[in-house]
């Protein structure tokens, strides 16, 4: 499945989303973790109603239009039916979560279509 691997959680049958091909977890030197996450992990849950798929949808439109500013992203979010202020706060948290976990970043790229 490309960049992702599915592994079984030792505590149950819930598949986790992980990073394949990383011999060392960058978290040991302060980077984002490669640790597998369950689909219901808090790092993958919506922020004020803005899920990773919604965040990626706005980012994709911004990418297509060449928009690179926070204000531009908020305007696009408004066009797509999101409250711009809520979206701006959520986008900051999504960026922070990607900095914590490579899995979040890979899921974001998956929603972008990569």
Image (cartoon, rainbow, N blue to C red):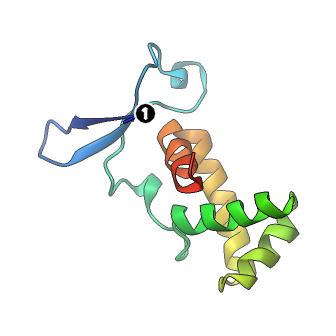
Q: Residue at x 68, y 81 (%)?
A: 80
Front-most of residues 74 and 110? 110
**Residue 4 percent across, percent down from the top left:** 40, 36
**Residue 70 percent across, percent down from the top left:** 83, 64
Tell whether 29 sits left or right of 46.
right
**Residue 68 percent across, percent down from the top left:** 86, 57
Question: In terms of image quadrants, where is residue 35?
Answer: top left
Counting labels gives 1
Front-most of residues 4 and 24? 4
Which residue is denoted by mark 1 in the rendering?
A: 2
Give the secondary structure at mark 1: loop
Tell whether 73 sits left or right of 108.
right
Q: Residue at x 81, y 78 (%)?
A: 75
Q: Residue at x 69, y 84 (%)?
A: 83
Question: In terms of image quadrants, where is residue 89?
Answer: bottom right
Tell whether 15 sits left or right of 30.
left
Front-most of residues 36 and 81? 81
Q: Residue at x 36, y 36 (%)?
A: 1
Seen in the picture, residue 49 relative to 112 is either above or below; the reply is: below
Quadrant of the snapshot with the C terminus: top right
Q: Residue furthest top?
A: 23
**Residue 37 percent across, percent down from the top left:** 36, 43
Residues packed near mark 1 inside 10 Å, few (<14), some (14 to 19) or many (20 plus): few
């Amino acid at each position: 499945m490309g960049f992702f691997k599915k592994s079984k959680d030792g505590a149950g049958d819930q598949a986790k989303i992980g990073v394949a091909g990383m011999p060392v977890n960058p978290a040991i030197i302060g980077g984002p973790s490669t640790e597998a996450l369950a689909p219901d992990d808090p790092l993958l849950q919506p922020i004020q109603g803005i899920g990773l798929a919604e965040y990626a949808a706005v980012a994709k439109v911004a990418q297509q239009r060449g928009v690179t500013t926070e204000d531009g992203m908020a305007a696009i979010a408004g066009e797509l039916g999101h409250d711009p202020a809520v979206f701006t706060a959520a986008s900051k948290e999504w960026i922070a979560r990607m900095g914590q976990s490579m899995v979040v970043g890979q899921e974001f790229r998956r929603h972008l279509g990569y």
